[in-house]
Image (tube, helix red, strand yellow):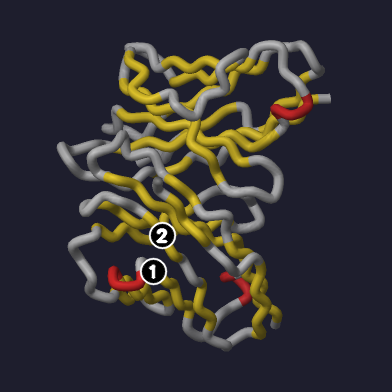
C-alpha cells in the first residue's frame, strides 16, 4: 500500500536557521512521483516540486533544496536561511503512474519561523 | 492565466441542508480531483473526474456525496443532508495528463464548509 510519513509534526526555528523537513514514503511501484506543497496560513496549497522515481538528482531552487534517496525511500526538503514568510504547513505527497494520479499526502509538518 | 477557481470560498450550512461546491480547472486542464482536509489533518483524496466521466471515486463516502464534471461548466461536488462531521476544507485540483505520467496537480484556494 502507498503511504507517506512526515514524522515531524511541528518545527520551530529562528530566522536565518536552516531547517530540514523529512518525508518517507512506501510504494510497491517502480514508477512513481513525489511532490511537496506549501500551505501558508491563508490556506491555499502552493506547488513546490515534482520529482519522478527515475531522477535521483538533488534539486536546488533558491533557498529551497530537495534530497531524494531511493535507498531509504526518503524525499527530504531543506530551507536554507529560513525567513518568517516560510512559516506554513508543508505536505509531502506520492502518486503512482499506473494509478489514477491521486495524491497520497503525509500529515504535514508545521514550520514556524520566529524573527 | 487564471489558476484553479473554487467557489464559494466559505459556505455555512445547517444540518440536513445541501452543499454545492464548484471548481473551474485551469485553462487547458481536463482532469479534476477533489480532496478533503479535516481540521489539523492532511488532505484525503475523494474523486477524480474527466469531462463527463468519473474515473476514480474510491475516496468518496458511499452516501450523500456525489461529483460531476459536465461537458460545459465547472465540476460540482455535492453533499446532501450535511452533518457536522462534513465540516472541512474541500480542495479541487486540476492537471493535464499524459500517458503513464503523473502531471502536477494545481490546487484551488479551497471551500471551507461549516455545518452548524
- Residue A97 falls in image quadrant: top left
Q: Can you give x and y, in whole percent of width and height, for residue B24 in the image? A: 43, 27
Label 2 secondary element: strand
Between B21 and B58, which is closer to the camera in this rendering?
A: B58
Q: Which mark is residue B99?
A: none
Q: In the image, what residue occupies the spot 64% across and 52% down?
A: A42
Whole-percent x, y for residue B87 in the image: 72, 31
At x 48% / y 50%, what residue is drawn? A105
Query: Disc 1, disc 2: CB below 8 Å?
Result: yes
The residue at which mark 2 appears reads as: A25
Looking at the image, is mark 1 or mark 2 earlier in the sequence?
A: 2
Q: Is residue A87 above or below residue B95?
A: below
Residue A31: image location, x then y, percent = 22, 52
Instruction: For mark 2, name the chain.
Output: A
Q: Report the label total.
A: 2
Name the quadrant containing residue B10: top right
Q: Position of residue A79 (x, y in %)?
A: 48, 78
Label 1: which residue?
A74
Can you say whether A97 is above or below B24 in the image?
Answer: below
Picture layout, residue B92 above or below residue A69: above
Amino acid at each position: 500500500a502507498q503511504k507517506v510519513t512526515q514524522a515531524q509534526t511541528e518545527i520551530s526555528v529562528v530566522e536565518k536557521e536552516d531547517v530540514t523537513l523529512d518525508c518517507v514514503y512506501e510504494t510497491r511501484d517502480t514508477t512513481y512521483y513525489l511532490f511537496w506543497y506549501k500551505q501558508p496560513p491563508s490556506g491555499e496549497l502552493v506547488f513546490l516540486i515534482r520529482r519522478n522515481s527515475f531522477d535521483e538528482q538533488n534539486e536546488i531552487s533558491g533557498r529551497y533544496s530537495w534530497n531524494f534517496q531511493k535507498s531509504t525511500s526518503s524525499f527530504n526538503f531543506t530551507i536554507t536561511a529560513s525567513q518568517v514568510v516560510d512559516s506554513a504547513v508543508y505536505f509531502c505527497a506520492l502518486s503512482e503512474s499506473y494509478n489514477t494520479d491521486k495524491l497520497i499526502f503525509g500529515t504535514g509538518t508545521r514550520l514556524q519561523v520566529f524573527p | 492565466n487564471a489558476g484553479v477557481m473554487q467557489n464559494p470560498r466559505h459556505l455555512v450550512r445547517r444540518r440536513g441542508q445541501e452543499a454545492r461546491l464548484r471548481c473551474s480547472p485551469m485553462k487547458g486542464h481536463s482532469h479534476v480531483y477533489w480532496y478533503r482536509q479535516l481540521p489539523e489533518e492532511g488532505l484525503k483524496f475523494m474523486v477524480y473526474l474527466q469531462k463527463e466521466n468519473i474515473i476514480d471515486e474510491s475516496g468518496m463516502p458511499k452516501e450523500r456525496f456525489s461529483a460531476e464534471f459536465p461537458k460545459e461548466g465547472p465540476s460540482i461536488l455535492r453533499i446532501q443532508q450535511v452533518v457536522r462531521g462534513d465540516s472541512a476544507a474541500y480542495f479541487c485540483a486540476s492537471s493535464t495528463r499524459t500517458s503513464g505520467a503523473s502531471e502536477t496537480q494545481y490546487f484551488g484556494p479551497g471551500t471551507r464548509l461549516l455545518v452548524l
